[in-house]
Image (cartoon, rainbow, N blue to C red):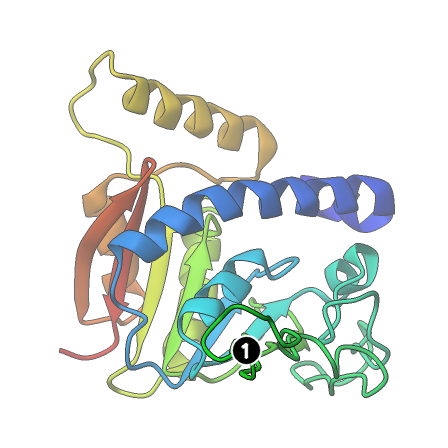
Amino acid sequence: MTTFEYHGTNPRSNKLFNQGMSNLSTITMKKVLDSYQGFEGLTTIVDVGGGTGASLNMILSKYPTIKGINFDLPRDFCICGVSNSGIGFGAGIPGPRSGRGSGLQQNPRRGSGRGSGLKKISGIGDGDTNLRPRPAPLPSLVGGDMFVSVPNGDAIFMKWICHDWSNEHSSKFLKNCYNALPNNGKVIVAEYILPVALDTSLAMKSVVDMDIIMLAYSQGGKERTEKEFEALAKGAGFEGFRVMCCAFNTYVMEFLKKI
């Protein structure tokens, strides 16, 4: 039994895992959004393996015109209590035997007042202005399996996904990503990059530690060098590859469908 299969049989373990990933993602994504400008101009972004939606919600908060799709196994939405309203579990999440890739509708009784603005505040201007901050759009939840298919979008976001899987497995879901993109689309990959030359820096130690964890934790997963990521991208059909920036040892890369 793999680690991910175990999470599927143990709701408590799965919930703790996803909550931990959510907390770590929040720290990293703050830096990513400060450093990376590649979300600008996007229409639809799909967060593959989005879990609780922490990363995607932060992206949509900064870029509210983007339509977001949180794509993960249906069980993760169920166990973590994720819904389009942001409160509790939304009915209608597709189960393992229902239509994969079918989205959810927002629960009209929940979340309809979310982000509805602030009450009148005296002492600001003439005291008659209601301050109504623009709420971040709620992402759609789509349950499915990235090894089968991925929802369409002009960009696909994958953070700490590739290192869980072997080259063979990674190539399979990256090809599905390729097929889900338009010709000008891209996959935004956030991963550690294993340096070629070893040193004694804390960054180096962190990557090596994670590489060892992947060795024990996954089936064939590993950290990769920049050249290995480029080979992975080209092997899945992508014509372009570039490293954009680094956020707390997590590098943001772009796999470009066409150049």
- Which residue shows up at 20% across the image and 15% down it? 199
User: In the image, 111: left or right of 21?
Assistant: right
Q: Is residue 2 visible?
A: no
Q: Can residue 68 be seen in this view?
A: yes
- Which residue shows up at 51% across the image and 65% down it? 56
- Which is nearer the eye, 126 or 52? 126
Q: Quadrant of the N terminus?
A: top right
Of helix, strand and loop, which one carries label 1? loop
Residue 76 % position (x, y): 74, 59
- Which is nearer the eye, 245 or 96? 245
Residue 97 % position (x, y): 82, 77
Residue extending farthest top: 200
- Is 78 drawn above or below residue 23 in the view shown? below
- Which residue shows up at 25% across the image and 16% down it? 201
The picture quadrant where one finds residue 20 is: top right
Q: Mark 1 points at which residue?
A: 127
User: In the image, 119: left or right of 95?
Assistant: left
Crowding at dot 1, Cα within 10 Å, few <14 / some 14-19 / many 20+, comes out as few
Q: Quadrant of the C terminus?
A: bottom left
User: In the image, 165: left or right of 181?
Assistant: right
Residue type at mark 1 is: Gly
- Is 141 drawn above or below residue 23 in the view shown? below
